[in-house]
Image (cartoon, rainbow, N blue to C red):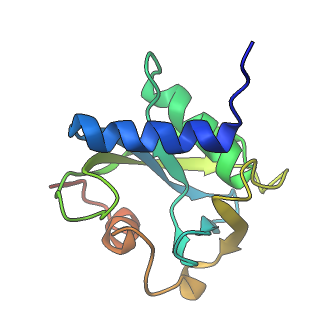
Amino acid sequence: MLRVPRGVWGVVKEAARHILRRPVVGIAAAARTADGRWVLVRRTDTGEWALPGGTLEWGEELRIAIARELEEEAGVVVQELGGLAGVYSRPDRDLRFHAVTIVVHARVSEPQSAPMNPAEIAEVKLFRTSELPSHLAHGMTDMLNNARGAEVVWE
């Protein structure tokens, strides 16, 4: 049986998205620990901080996807999923592809393991609100800023 390395499979899936030219469903978490610190991941493609998250897999429910992505990217465990923070669909938000990204609030554990794909995520860090970076990767700056407010945002 032919075994395809995980990184190669990711590239194939990414290329298929471009070929099919359909929006993908993204899920991201405005994740905080019990003491109120925000969980951000540093991406290797931009070197910038981002909300942890990813894309919905075929046959996967959103609740399962966000728990999986938080564990894979940030090494955290979901303790409680909160409400909707926003839905973002502007086509120019992410240059890689057109995504409809659903951002949810989550309370999570502190990181318990390293990111599973170090080719994608360089590090995980907990930030107090006063320490948050002013800019996030892939159009996520306003996602985080909006999540800090009380109003759900639709785009």
Is residue 82 visible in the rendered structure shown here? no
Q: Quadrant of residue 121?
A: bottom right
Q: Is residue 119 above or below residue 103?
A: below
Q: Residue furthest right?
A: 113
Q: Nearer the viewer, residue 145 or 23?
A: 23
Number of marks in the image?
0
Residue ID at (59%, 86%): 131
Q: Quadrant of residue 119?
A: bottom right
Residue ID at (38%, 62%): 147
Residue ID at (52%, 32%): 65
Residue 129, percent across and down? 55, 79
Q: Nearer the viewer, residue 21 or 117?
A: 21
Q: Nearer the viewer, residue 81 or 133?
A: 133
Q: Quadrant of residue 17?
A: top left
Name the quadrant of the N terminus.
top right
Is residue 142 visible in the rendered structure shown here? yes
Residue 104, percent across and down? 42, 47
Name the quadrant of the C terminus.
bottom left
Q: Residue furthest top?
A: 1
Residue 40, percent across and down? 60, 66
Q: Is residue 128 above or below residue 63?
A: below
Residue 70 relative to residue 92: left or right: right
Q: Is residue 126 above or below residue 112?
A: below
Residue 141, percent across and down? 37, 74
Residue 32 relative to residue 152: left or right: right
Residue ID at (38%, 67%): 138
